[in-house]
């Protein structure tokens, strides 16, 4: 099963509150912080909502 490596590349200063909460729910706190999630529809939806703030890489295990 594939995993997704999500990295915060743009600051959440000035972002709408819903996007800030989504970033926090993805486990990202500071710039360039990274978290690994399983690839599923819920995570894909969260990433799609904040795609302008994050970088996503697919990791095959």
Image: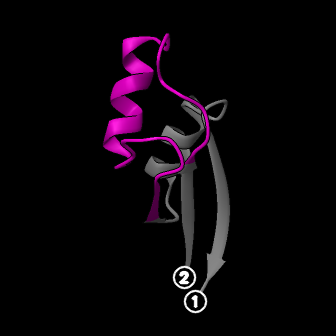
- The scheme the figure's colours follow is one colour
Q: Position of residue 52 (x, y in %)?
A: 67, 30
Write down the residue under mark 1: 61
Judged left or right of residue 55, residue 6 is left
Write down the residue under mark 2: 1
Lower position in the chain sequence, tag 2 or tag 1: 2
At 50% from the left and 41% from the top, the residue drawn is 31
Q: Closer to the camera, 47 or 34?
A: 34
Q: Position of residue 26 (x, y in %)?
A: 38, 47
Circle 1 Cα neighbour tier, 10 Å, few/some/many (<14 / 14–19 / ≥20): few
Up/down of 50 relative to 28, above or below: above
Up/down of 7 relative to 22, above or below: below
Q: Secondary structure at mark 1?
A: loop
Q: Quadrant of the N terminus?
A: bottom right
Q: Closer to the camera, 59 or 29?
A: 29
Outermost residue on the front side: it is 31
Q: Position of residue 24 (x, y in %)?
A: 33, 38
Up/down of 21 relative to 54, above or below: above
Magenta run includes residue 18? yes
Outermost residue on the bottom side: it is 61
Q: Quadrant of the C terminus?
A: bottom right
Q: Closer to the camera, 56 or 46?
A: 56
At 46% from the left and 52% from the top, the residue drawn is 33
Callout in the foreground (2, 1)? 1
Judged left or right of residue 22, residue 54 is right
Q: CA distance from mark 2 to mark 1?
A: 7 Å
Tell me whether circle 2 and circle 1 mark residues in contact (CB < 8 Å): yes
Q: Position of residue 49 (x, y in %)?
A: 55, 30
Q: Secondary structure at mark 2?
A: loop
Segment tinted magenta in the rendering: 8-36
Circle 2 Cα neighbour tier, 10 Å, few/some/many (<14 / 14–19 / ≥20): few
At 55% from the left and 55% from the top, the residue drawn is 6
């Amino acid at each position: 099963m594939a995993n997704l490596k999500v990295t915060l590349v743009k600051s959440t200063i000035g972002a709408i509150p819903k996007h800030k909460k989504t970033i926090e729910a993805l486990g990202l706190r500071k710039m360039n912080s990274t978290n690994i999630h399983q690839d599923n529809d819920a995570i894909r939806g969260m990433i799609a909502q904040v795609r302008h703030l994050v970088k996503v890489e697919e990791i095959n295990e």
